[in-house]
Amino acid sequence: MSSRRLPSWAWVTGLLSAALVVVVGLAVRAEPLPEGKPAATGTTVKPSPGEKKEPPAAAHPVPEESGQGRRVVYSLELRRVWLVDGAEKAVRTFEVWPGSVHPAEGSYKVFSRMATGTGTDGVSVANVIYFARASGATIAFSNAVDGARPKVDLGVQTGAVRQGVADGAALWAFAPEGTPVHVVT
């Protein structure tokens, strides 16, 4: 019985094809994380050269007519939140991704908090901070446990105002029950 060997080009082609399938599969599942956001493994991702970084809080001044004292300010138009200390200084500001139901402009207070749960969209969430009700929905800040942004046009009414994982943790630490939340345009 003679043994037949595969030519080397066949081995190389097979290995290259398998590697390509793995790389494409990983690329499809991958989502870049913003700078400083923890990955699922607890590591942090550094920005690539030229990648957009979040500007410092001074680059996004606290909106006028947004209340006084220690508070959370949420701008519907800018899709941004500010954590304002008692000295009227923004200690942190960040982008948010609102759901389909929005609170009216005005002053609210955090009335309930939940460390973890499941959002109306079925996503596992953390740092849930309830502050308003509108159109039959409860409005709450939260972050997806996996750090993902919410999907657009879910076909379901949701009052979720999502933010990144690190921003959710900062908001959780800043806003216990009773904290004022001012919603502006």
Image: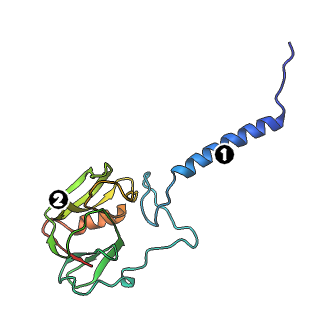
Which mark identifies residue 20? 1
Name the image quarter holding the N terminus: top right
- For residue 48, side relative to residue 156 (left or right): right
Residue at the disc numbered 2: 136
Q: Amino acid at mark 2?
A: Gly
Write the residue at 21% across / 86% down.
65
In the picture as drawn, the residue positioned furthest to the top comes out as: 1
Q: CA distance from mark 1 to mark 2?
A: 49 Å
Write the residue at 23% across / 79% down.
85
Q: Is residue 5 above or below residue 12?
A: above
**Number of callouts in the render?**
2
- Residue placed most toward the observer, 144 or 98: 98
Query: Where does the image place residue 156, in percent across and percent down from the top left?
Result: 29, 54
Query: Where does the image place residue 132, in percent across and percent down from the top left?
Result: 17, 66
SS for dot 2:
loop
10 Å neighbourhood of mark 2: few (<14), some, or many (≥20)?
few
Write the residue at 32% across / 59% down.
143
- Residue placed most toward the observer, 94 or 89: 94
In the picture as drawn, the residue positioned furthest to the front comes out as: 155
